[in-house]
Image (cartoon, rainbow, N blue to C red):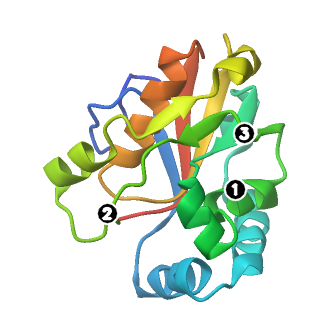
Amino acid sequence: MNRRLGHCACTHEWKHPFESVYSILDFDATVQAIMHQVKYRGKRRFAFYIGALLAGYVPQQIFSEVDALIAVPLHPGRQRKRGYNQSLLLASGLGRGPLLEGVLLRVRNTESQTRFDRTQRTKNVRGAFAVVPEQAGKINGKRLLLVDDIVTTGATTAAAAKALLDAGCASVRVLSIARD
């Protein structure tokens, strides 16, 4: 994996605070259908199983170069409505390394990103994440792997990574199930 700041494993250049992004699959109609079932049809177990199934396709180096995993959080209102956080279930299914929960919060309920362009997505998630001050010690100096379901422009993971870095973690890499 290339270590240049902002370099994606798929050779797409990023201008984001995370070091790299590794996506297991390309986003296609099959991935879209599965993630629609997970996010909007209550198929929560799919998320865990997808993480477990695809864990074997993630190079071990991705996990060996981080200290802990952290899932992109949902806003509490959205999580109550859905009943679960699909990114947390995906991260749990990966079964690799410590998974930190309750450290990173979505402090602002953002609109769905699905119909936004890059600029709108960035604006929508700016300042949407924060680290719980009492939990900051858990990430101080740590190399984190931020897990999300789908990465499109990287706006969500960039906003989450910024909050983590501002709170003192050493670095953030991103792992997603798919990249659109």
Whichever of labels 3 and 1 marks the residue nearer the N terminus, that label is: 1
Q: In this view, does 21 lie above or below 2?
A: below
Residue, x 74% and y 42% (percent of image)? 60
Disc 3 target residue: 102
Q: In which quarter of the image is residue 151?
A: bottom left
Q: Which residue is drawn at 22% across and 44% down?
A: 123
Q: Residues within 10 Å of mark 1 (few under 14, many from 20)?
A: many
Residue at 55 percent across and 55 percent down: it is: 74
Residue 88 - label: 1
Mark number for residue 113? 2
Q: Pinpoint residue 93: horizontal percent, then vertical percent.
A: 79, 61
Task: Nearest to the eye among marks 3 and 1: give it.
Answer: 3
Disc 3 is placed on an element classified as: loop
Q: Do tag 2 and tag 3 residues touch (Cβ < 8 Å)?
A: no
The quadrant of the rendering that contains the C terminus is bottom left
Residue 124: percent from left, percent from top: 27, 49
| Element class at badge 2 | loop
Q: Which of 120 and 82 is in front in this view?
A: 82
Kind of residue at badge 1: Leu
- Determine whether label 3 and label 1 are within 8 Å by CB: no
Quick one: label 3, few (<14), some, or many (20+) residues within 10 Å?
Answer: few
Of the residues tagged 2 and 3, which is closer to the observer? 3
Residue 2 visible (yes or no):
no
